[in-house]
Image (cartoon, coloured by chain):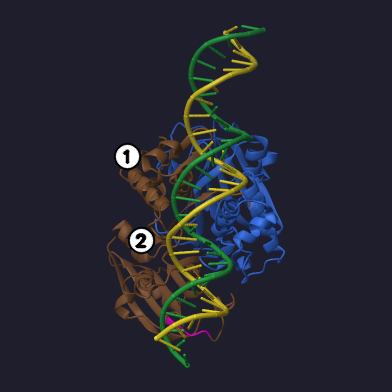
Chain colours: A brown, B blue, C yellow, D green
Amino acid sequence: MQATSSKQMIIAHDIISKIKYRQYRPGTYLPSENQLTELYGSSRETIRKALNELNDLGMIQKIKGKGSIVLDTQRYTFPISGITSFKELNNSQEMNAQTKVLHNELSQVPEYFLARGVDETQEATFLERLRSVNGEPVVLDKDYLLKPSIQGIPTKEAENSLYEYLENQLGYQISYATKEVTVESPTDEQKSLLQLIDHEMVVAVRSMTYLNDTTLVQLTESYHRPDKFKFTDFARRKKI
Amino acid sequence: MQATSSKQMIIAHDIISKIKYRQYRPGTYLPSENQLTELYGSSRETIRKALNELNDLGMIQKIKGKGSIVLDTQRYTFPISGITSFKELNNSQEMNAQTKVLHNELSQVPEYFLARGVDETQEATFLERLRSVNGEPVVLDKDYLLKPSIQGIPTKEAENSLYEYLENQLGYQISYATKEVTVESPTDEQKSLLQLIDHEMVVAVRSMTYLNDTTLVQLTESYHRPDKFKFTDFARRKKI
DNA sequence: AATTGACACGTGTATATACAAGTTGTAATA
DNA sequence: TATTACAACTTGTATATACACGTGTCAATT
């Protein structure tokens, strides 16, 4: 599901772009699987695997006996769900964003992750970054990049996307992450950096990121200003 | 992906239960697809579709050329992600929960949803419920059940799971939902019902629920006490 | 007029086959 | 010894075929 080269992925991307540029419009049916089979010169199974991707993404709704309806994704297309980095988010939303690196040094792993199975002796590079949009501080990111997979990161790279560095520079394939969101009272540091008003709380997003081979490579604590935080999700009902 | 009757679903469930009861343990490999093919007397494609379900759920990690590793789901198994109702959550977590129905009457659709494409003249049954755990108020749910799909709901049913009523009593198939999470200042009603301390904020989860045929049937505004709110998620990196 | 039945067409599931490509251990080779 | 080459496994992709089953149309029947 990663490489963009397979036939089913090419087809999926093509249909997505046709939806994006409104060749296929929300509320209308896609061509039937058999028609798409002819259109792309592939087997029906390949088409179906492509359509199932779109179904999982919430871009279409498959209806047995009828067809696949294009859903209106515009309404809920602010992608914080899934694994999306600040930099990517920034690009896709075209906000005027800025990243300031506050720390980039060796450190211990914080308490929260120790309670979740991370070894206390685990060496890590601590990276603290303050994200601002239009001059206003919005997010405080604390990343812990784990050795030996990640030996460190140039501060210049840290100003951009971490994922980009890990994937393009180090050749790693980030595969999945677990994430936990809570609302907490801010520490003094968070209060001053995020310019929080008295009694205002902070939204904490803590995540653990893994590679394809299940190697844990990154721990993140991300603190958001509550008034700037919005999380949008699309979910299918599964009976498992 | 809904009915539990198909072969691939039976296989998926079986493997899940074997993981659950630790016949297959976290960190170890599942039998290979070919072995599972023999074990279940099915084709490899059927096995693969079952395994892909588990992969999507974050229960296993497939590694090309090696096999499928069982992941440790215990650590992040508090399912608020996805569409899961309070009642189901309650059952799975075995909390001592209670539901009090505050309102059950006709009403207009609130502003938030009008801004998101819902018609102003849309008729709806307004259902307000206060959820408590161990005597403490935790969540305030405001549901709007849309006509003509849903003509109303017996208050007795409202004390249980709405989804159960819709699926088992009305025979509807709930398919997907969009969800948005924000942190806000509480209204006076929320402040008193949820027993919020001064300056404490409230977590608002607003969602729109759809049937298989894309019919919108339910709007929900769910307000959580910030100290009781926790949201856990598993996400795979997708390059689409 | 209302019901029934046949049919066409849609997606859902299951199977068999083939080859591509990643991983690992082993044997042959330089 | 170190490297290379290969074999034997693994998962990934693509194809062809068949049938089950949901939906809608339309004509025949009641």
Q: Could you say whether the residue bearing mark 2 is in a helix, strand or loop?
A: helix
Q: Is residue B158 left or right of residue A167?
A: right
Q: Position of residue B11 (x, y in %)?
A: 66, 53
Examine the rendering and report whether any part of residue A26 can be seen.
no
Q: Position of residue B177 (x, y in %)?
A: 51, 46
Asked whether residue A123 is drawn in magenta, I would say yes
Q: Nearer the viewer, residue B93 or B42?
A: B42
Say which quarter of the image contains residue B60: bottom right
Examine the rendering and report whether any part of residue A12 can be seen.
yes
| Numbered range of the magenta stretch | A122-126
> Are discs 1 and 2 less than 8 Å apart at CB?
no
Q: Quadrant of the N terminus of chain A?
A: bottom left
Residue at 37%, 72% (x, y): give it.
A162
Q: Amino acid at mark 1?
A: Gln
Near mark 2 (Cα within 10 A), the count class, few <14, some 14-19 or many ≥20, is some
Q: Position of residue B186 (x, y in %)?
A: 50, 55
Q: Amino acid at mark 2?
A: Leu
Q: Position of residue A40 (x, y in %)?
A: 37, 43
Q: How many marks?
A: 2
Asked whether residue A120 is drawn in magenta, I would say no
Foreground label between 1 and 2: 1
Say which quarter of the image contains residue A78: bottom left
Disc 1 is attached to a residue of which chain? A
Near mark 1 (Cα within 10 A), the count class, few <14, some 14-19 or many ≥20, is few
Q: Nearer the viewer, residue A207 or B6?
A: B6
Residue at 54%, 31% (x, y): give it.
B147
Q: Nearer the viewer, residue A56 or D2?
A: D2
Q: Is residue A140 left or right of residue B1?
A: left
Quickly name the residue at label 2: A89
Disc 2 is attached to a residue of which chain? A
Q: Could you say whether the residue bearing mark 1 is in a helix, strand or loop?
A: loop
Disc sitting over residue A23 in the figure: 1
